[in-house]
Image (tube, rainbow, N blue to C red):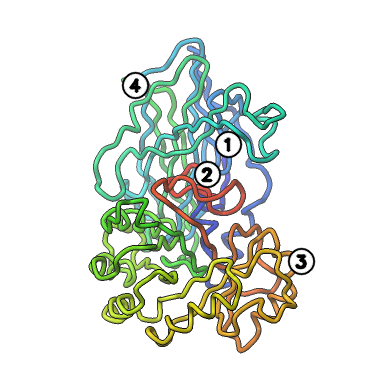
Amino acid sequence: MIRSTRSSAVRTSALRFAGAALAALTLSAAFGAHPSLAAAINNPDGSKVDAFDSMALLLPTSALQGNASVALTAARNEYESFQVKVSAGGAALTNVSVSLGAALTGPNGATIPAANVRFAREDYYRLTTMSDGELATEFPRDAAGTCQGDCRIPDALIPERDLLTNEDRAAFPMTVPTNENRVAWVDVLVPTSAATGTYSGTVLVKAGAATLSTIPVTLEVLNATLPSTSTMKSQVFVNANDVGGSWSTYQQLAELGLANHLSVVPDGFDPAAGASVLGPLLNGTDNKVPLAGARLTQIPITRWGDFAKWKQVLTGLGKADAARFWCDEVDTATCSSWFTPALATYPGLKLQQIPRYQKATTDADYLDARSQAAVPIVTGLDPKAGWFQQWQGVLGLHGLYAGWVHRPLPGSRPLQRHAWMGYRPAHLAGPGHGLERLSPRSRR
C-alpha cells in the first residue's frame, strides 16, 4: 500500500507553510521510509497494474514492483498525488483508461468532488546528451555523454480534462505496447471545506469494457488548511518573445503556475496592454485557478522595462508594492546606475540583485546597499551562508532569494525561488531541485 504525506511535486517544493505546527504535520515524513509494499495486481493475460507514490520514476520498460492500494494524507487546500502504472504482457493493451471509480467518501457521507480528482497520462521525452552523472544506471551513456539504449524519460503530462478550458484532451484511452508500461498521474485536491477524517474510494483501470484493476484509495484529511498563496515567494519568467507577446498565453501559464503555488511572471511585455490580465492574477480573483485567492507574489522588472507604465498599471491595480527591479549578475556599479533612475520614476521600487558569480562577499560592492533581496547562485551559496545570514538580519528587511535551492539556510527566513520559463513550461529545473516541470510528472 502506498503511504504518502508528501504533496505532489512542484506544489510541495514551492510551498513554505505559515506555521511550524502545520509544517510539522506535512513535512515530517516528506522523505521518510519507503511505503509498505503489497502485491501488485497481476492479470491472467500477463498484464499488471501497480500504484506508486508521486516520487517514483517510472520508465517505459521499468520492472519496478508497485502496490495494490493507495493511502494518502493531506491538509485541506493541499494536493496529494500518486501514479498508476499499467504494464502489458506479451500482447499490447488497447483502449486503456484510468478514471475515478467510487467517489472518495468520508465522515457523514461527505465526498471529495470528482472534479477535484484529476487524471493525466505521462508522456515521454527522448534524452540525447547527458549533462552529468545523474541517472547513470537508468540511462547508460558513452564517453561523450550520449545516452545509449532506450532513452525515454517521463516528461509531459497530458490531462484527461484541460484545467483551464474544461475540454477533453487526448490522455485516454491509451495503448500500452507489448512488454511496456504506460503511466497515469492522479492529483487529489482537498477542498477547504472538507471535514477532517478518512475518505475511501477507488480508481478504475479498464481496457475497453474489461476491468484490469480496481484500486482502493484512502485519504486522511488533516485538521489543517494550507494557504492558497505560498508564503515562499517565487518568480518563473515568461518572456514575451517566447509567446509572441501574447498576454492571453501568459495568462494561461500564470494560471497553471498559481494552481501549483508558483508566481509565473511576465518579462518584456507591454504592461498597459495587460492590466486586465494582471488584475485578477495579482488580486487573487482569477476564477480559472483552483486554489481560491491564489495570487502572484511579485512582479520583477528588468532595466528594459517601461517603469512609468508599470507604475501606472500596478498603482491602478492597488499593487504598486509588488514591483521589483531585477539586476542579474552585473557588477554592482552597473546595477546601481540602472536602479537609480528607475527608482526616481517609480518611488518605492524594491531592488532584487543576483551578485556576480564567485565574487567575494568581502568586496565592498558585492551588493548595492539598497538591495532588499539577494539571489546568490546556489552552487556558491554554501561557503557564503554565514555572510547571507548576517546580511538578512540587517534592519529585518532583507530577503534571501535563491535559484535551485536544495535546502534552506539553518535559521533563515523562508527562501524564495527563481526560475526562467519560455514557451515550454515542462522544463524548469533538474531533479531534486524543487521545480522540475510545471506541467508535471516530476513536479518536485
Front of the two marks 3 and 4: 3
Looking at the image, residue 423 lies above or below residue 69: below
Contact, mark 1 vs mark 2 (Cβ under 8 Å):
yes
**Dot in front, 3 or 1:** 3
Q: Amino acid at mark 1?
A: Leu
Residue type, numbered disc 3:
Pro
Mark closer to the chain start, 1 or 2: 1
Q: Kindly indicate whether the residue at mark 1 contacts the one at mark 4 (C-beta within 8 angstroms).
A: no
Residue 236: x %, y % from top left = 46, 59
> Picture coordinates of residue 397 (x, y %)?
57, 84
Q: Secondary structure at mark 4?
A: strand
Secondary structure under the numbered disc 2 in the rendered image: loop
**Nearer-N-terminus badge (2/3):** 3
Distance from disc 3 to disc 4, alpha carbons, whole Å, reads 55 Å
* In front: label 4 or label 2: 2
- Dividing the picture into quarters, in which one does residue 267 lie? bottom left
Q: What kind of element bears circle 1?
A: loop
Q: Position of residue 64 (x, y in %)?
A: 61, 28
Say which label, 4 or 2, has the lower sequence index.
Answer: 4
Q: Which mark is residue 95?
A: 4
Q: Read off the residue under disc 1.
A: 57
- Callout 3 crowding tier (Cα within 10 Å): few <14, some 14–19, many ≥20: few
Looking at the image, is mark 4 or mark 1 earlier in the sequence? 1
The Cα atoms of the two marked residues, 4 and 1, are separated by 24 Å
Q: Nearer the viewer, mark 2 or mark 3?
A: 3
Residue 93 in the image: state x and y as whole percent: 41, 17
Q: What separation in Å lies between label 3 and label 1 (alpha carbons)? A: 32 Å
Amino acid type at image mark 4: Asn
Q: Residue 442 — which label?
A: 2
Q: Nearer the viewer, mark 4 or mark 1?
A: 1
